[in-house]
């Protein structure tokens, strides 16, 4: 008797203490339209203590022959569970999912159909963020049967929430690095995309819902600085090892600086102990010395570029002084010398001038510091120091501005903010541009950490503003100006569900 045919796709879950989100994830797998015979599920319980292991066993009992559960002691991260699941997989394709997250009902059927139609080794389906979880969306601008890794936004979106051809992974021995408790999906996904014969993107459906827990308990939200520093250094080293020097490496490395290395130098560095600050300074400075060439630096926003250069050229106190200027004092003055413009941060005139050069950074002139934020009926009004911005937006939502006497008043219509927000909640970065509003340059889903083209509106002296409650149909949402970890102003829209209210009361 012939053995049954291999399933089309194996879904691999790494599970550690993810109740009650795990139940929703499993329900979304059971609801997949691809059909039972074409789908295999391999779930690896990584030493859960909250009943997740028992929930997996119950699910497997309800779906005999369709779900395999592997129990193992806790390994400290998702890499080992994913590798064990991959070794046990028999599907032609594999799909990795976080046990906090869930899939749209047609996700696997659509992904497999596209991979077969285009002969793709990797297929990306559009990812939606839930509970204000930020997801870069520029790679999902349109369907792409054949996407170029080095000439696209893909290097910014290298999470493992994609369909992979298993034969490709086996042929190139692509596995997760088990020495990385966080971030191990980056080298895995980069290697798969680097070796793939074809990468495809699908945009017409919400394939994957990436959930931010109400307690922010996802491992990436609670990782310690020391682990983050180690991870960033390993990621940069892996890029340099995999890709030869030149434009292709730069296309990947620029997003490592923009998205990961510069984030080590955000305002929250001021709150760390001295030893942790020194570690961050030393690693960021070393990576900048090794990899931050002129081409990469020119594609970063001035704030990120200056901090990286000071980490490279100065000591820890120099770096902290620059961060403290942004976080507590506001925008420094601009000096002109020899026809060039410089941001006169602490250290200017002592450290190399090139570290502070903003001559070719038009977004520097648009840099604004919010000094007052208030509600005026159905408008959020922001008063900011600075008058060099020609337009301001909250990502894709433009504001009305007026400029006078060195100040800019920014007006956002709250009804528009709510109407255009994701139903699960959303935070939008407020940014200013030196020219007419261009949604492709606005900070946010395309470039959260300061890529050249727009300047984040900061609020070093802003007082907390109470949320405004807005009813939209049957929904009640809270809208509020908030600050991120680096002092950038954001507008938050949060649906007020009973579950969210209960979680907030528990935190209090």
Image: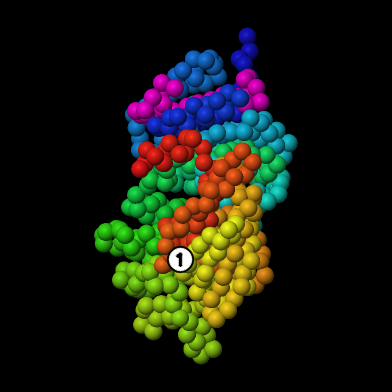
Residue drawn at the location 71% of the way across and 46% of the way down: 143
Q: Position of residue 508 (x, y in %)?
A: 35, 43
Residue at (51, 62) in percent of width and height: 374
Toward the top, the furthest residue is 1
- What residue is at 62 percent from the left and 58 percent from the top? 413
Of the pair 276 and 403, the residue shown nearer to us: 403
Q: Quadrant of residue 355?
A: bottom left
Is residue 50 covered in magenta? yes
Q: Quadrant of residue 322?
A: bottom left
Residue furthest to the front in view is 377
Closer to the camera, 61 or 405? 405
The residue located at (45%, 65%) in the rendering is 459
Whether residue 466 is visible here, answered yes or no, is: yes
The boundaries of the magenta stretch are: 32-55
Residue density around tag 1, few if under 14, some if 14–19, many if 20 or more, within 10 Å: many
The chosen color scheme is: rainbow
């Amino acid at each position: 008797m012939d053995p049954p045919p291999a399933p089309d796709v194996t879904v691999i879950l790494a599970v550690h203490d993810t109740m009650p989100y795990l139940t929703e994830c499993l329900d979304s797998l059971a609801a997949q339209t691809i059909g039972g015979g074409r789908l295999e599920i391999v779930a690896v319980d990584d030493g859960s203590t909250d009943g997740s292991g028992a929930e997996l066993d119950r699910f497997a009992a309800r779906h005999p022959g369709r779900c395999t559960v592997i129990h193992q002691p806790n390994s400290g991260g998702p890499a080992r569970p994913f590798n064990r699941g991959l070794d046990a997989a028999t599907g032609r394709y594999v799909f990795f999912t976080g046990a906090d997250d869930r899939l749209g009902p047609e996700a696997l059927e659509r992904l497999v159909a596209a991979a077969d139609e285009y002969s793709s080794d990797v297929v990306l389906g559009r990812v939606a963020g839930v509970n204000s979880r930020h997801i870069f969306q520029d790679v999902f601008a349109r369907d792409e049967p054949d996407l170029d890794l080095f000439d696209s936004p893909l290097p910014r979106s290298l999470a493992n929430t994609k369909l992979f051809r298993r034969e490709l992974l086996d042929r190139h021995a692509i596995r997760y690095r088990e020495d990385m408790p966080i971030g191990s999906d980056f080298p895995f996904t980069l290697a798969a995309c680097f070796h793939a014969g074809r990468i495809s993107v699908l945009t017409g459906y919400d394939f994957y819902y990436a959930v931010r827990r109400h307690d922010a308990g996802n491992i990436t939200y609670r990782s310690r600085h020391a682990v983050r520093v180690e991870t960033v250094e390993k990621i940069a080293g892996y890029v340099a090892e995999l890709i030869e020097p030149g434009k292709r490496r730069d296309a990947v490395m620029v997003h490592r600086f923009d998205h990961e290395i510069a984030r080590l130098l955000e305002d929250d560095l001021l709150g760390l102990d001295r030893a942790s600050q020194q570690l961050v300074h030393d690693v960021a400075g070393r990576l900048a010395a090794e990899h931050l060439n002129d081409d990469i630096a020119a594609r970063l926003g001035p704030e990120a570029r200056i901090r990286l250069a000071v980490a490279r050229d100065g000591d820890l106190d120099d770096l902290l002084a620059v961060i403290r200027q942004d976080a507590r004092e506001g925008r420094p003055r601009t000096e002109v010398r020899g026809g060039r413009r410089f941001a006169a941060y602490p250290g200017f005139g002592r450290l190399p001038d090139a570290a502070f050069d903003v001559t070719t950074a038009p977004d520097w002139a648009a840099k604004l510091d919010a000094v007052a934020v208030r509600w005026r009926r159905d408008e959020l009004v922001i008063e900011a120091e600075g008058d060099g911005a020609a337009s301001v937006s909250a990502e894709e939502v433009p504001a009305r501005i007026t400029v006078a006497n060195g100040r800019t008043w920014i007006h956002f219509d709250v009804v528009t903010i709510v109407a255009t927000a994701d139903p699960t909640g959303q935070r939008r970065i407020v940014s200013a541009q030196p020219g007419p509003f261009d949604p492709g340059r606005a900070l946010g889903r395309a470039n959260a950490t300061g890529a050249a083209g727009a300047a984040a509106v900061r609020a070093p002296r802003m007082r907390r503003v109470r949320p405004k409650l807005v009813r939209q149909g049957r929904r009640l949402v809270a809208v509020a100006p908030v600050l991120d970890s680096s002092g950038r102003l954001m507008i938050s829209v949060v649906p007020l569900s009973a579950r969210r209210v209960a979680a907030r009361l528990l935190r209090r």
